[in-house]
Image (cartoon, grey):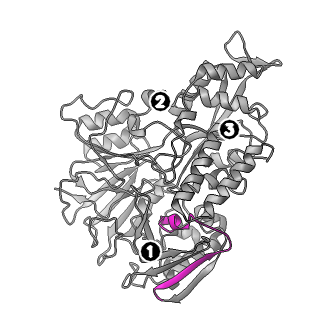
Amino acid sequence: MRTPRTHVLRRAAVPGLALSLAAVLSACGTGGGTSGSGASASPQAGGSLKIAIDSDPVCLDPQQSTLIASAVINRQVVDSLIAQDPESGKFVSWLADTWKASADAKSFTFHLRSGITFSDGTPVDAEAVKANFDSIVAAGAKSPYGSQYLLGYTGTEVEDAQNLTVSFDQPNAQFLMAASTPTLGLLSEAGLKASLADRCTGKGLIGSGPFKFSSYTKDSSTKLVKRSGYKWASALAKHSGDAYLDQVTYNVVTEPSVRSGSLKSGQVDVATTIQSQDESPLKSAGYTLLSRVNPGVVIGAAPNLKSSKILQDADVRRAVQLAVDRQQITDTVLSPSYGVASSILGDTTPGYSDVSASLKADPDKAESLLDAAGWKKGSDGIREKDGKKLSISLLYFYQANVIEAVQQQLRAVGIDLKLKQVTAAEYATASAKGDYDLRSTSVSRPDPDILRAAFSKSAGNLAWFTGDEPQEARLEKVLAAQLATTDTAERNKLAAEAQQILVDEGYAFPFSQLTQVVGVSSKITGITFDAASRILLHDAGRTS
């Protein structure tokens, strides 16, 4: 397994030495997932922090939301049973100091630390854990991630205030990862009593974390304030007591250049989702860039095997795979901070396997496969067969620069890729209709089970598997097996096999990794990434 890629891209010593995204860029320092800005400076107690985020969080309730913009906020408010080390993928203590999984991965026992309270003063005990998990199950589809994490949930048995066992009617090896996420983070009883709609606006966002919810104004800002008396940070934190900052404000700034401009002008201290073209100017101006690849399914596409006649041909799918030059995408439209996609999983994902040998661009071989399949180039360079053009459509809403680069690469071998761009809000409905040959893929999760959640016929079924191909059955068997074992080595072996099948059979087409790039003022220190590449603020503070 490759070492997770977390970079701290610091100030260039001389203006102009910070290279553009289309050129070669090297990190001046690396860390293991928790690298922070201004690591040599000590944070001062007090002060406020302003962060520019790229979109409205829409729903602040961690148990309902699936958006990054929401997670970077609610992660500061809610704690989880355990935490996942971004570097090793191992689990460490947080609200629970010990835990144990059964051999069949159907039950998980936790012992809670004593003396922990929600910000309303009520205890974080076993009954609170049970109430939260029961609430998530009751929410059903309103908690899309929660319903996946708690699939087969049969209940939580409370032994006493500090001991509990969570049980499932089927193996659920990904549950420990799930228990470390804000989705399964804990809210107080009062918070759970608020309606799901109210919780989206922040009402009921009462956690045990180092910050408390203060206010939310749609499409404008969200404010958090420090919670006094906090002393149960995870084992990954650099200190266990109160947060250093008194207040954090998240301002919605949708335009990338405006986010970067707001950072340079001093209107904000931190800007998230820094775009490729803005990296070099920020570094040259003396700002620190923190970056970490998102774990999970990378930016790419999956075929519609149900209705795309063209992509039902395995040789055409293999030709598409060979025609994509992933190194060129990084070199021309992204940055080396993104790395090069070398699997369907990002290289920070536990269980990631390097299958780059199967992803090496070979346009000549792609053309040979298409020739053999009967697709001959026409006068316009696009291939034809039986009077029909080799034209396929791709439904997407994100990373247009990457998609457009792929479009050009496919055209070079005679494939006409027609782009069907929709908004993020429209994507789910359009995707369900199935009116396309390919649909974009990118799902963040620091666990190899994301492959099952995304591609299994019993879950996301992103490739629209119908069971008509022998390798589909093999893939289903492998994905089910990795969910049924808690042995890390065995899970990783099975995950590697699944990644190889997905790539070799053209069931998934990786294009590029998705990377979180965050610009930080030199006056701020201690910002870190969690295992899902979301920023953490408990250790963050001002240096002046």
From the image, tell me which residue sits under label 1: 206
Q: How many marks?
A: 3
Can residue 121 be seen?
A: yes
Element type at mark 1: loop
Q: Secondary structure at mark 3?
A: loop
**Sequence order check: which comes first, mark 2 or mark 3?**
2
The part of the image, by quadrant, that contains residue 27 is: top left
Q: Residue furthest top?
A: 379
Three-letter amino acid code of the residue under disc 1? Ile
What secondary structure is found at the residue carrying circle 2?
Answer: helix
Q: Quadrant of the C terminus?
A: bottom left
| Sequence-wise first label, 1 or 3 | 1
Q: Is residue 270 magenta?
A: no
Q: Which mark is residue 505?
A: 3
Taking the magenta stretch, the answer to whether it contains residue 169 is: yes
Report, in whole angstroms, how far the alpha carbon at label 2 lies from the one at label 3.
21 Å
Identify whether 508 is placed above or below 17. below
Tag of residue 422: none
Q: Which residues are magenta?
A: 161-183
Identify the residue at horizontal 56%, vertical 58% (top origin).
490
Within 10 Å of disc 3 (Cα), the crowding (few <14, some 14-19, many 20+) is: some
Q: Is residue 41 left or right of residue 433?
A: left
Circle 2 residue: 327
**Mark 1 and mark 3: span between their CA atoms?**
47 Å
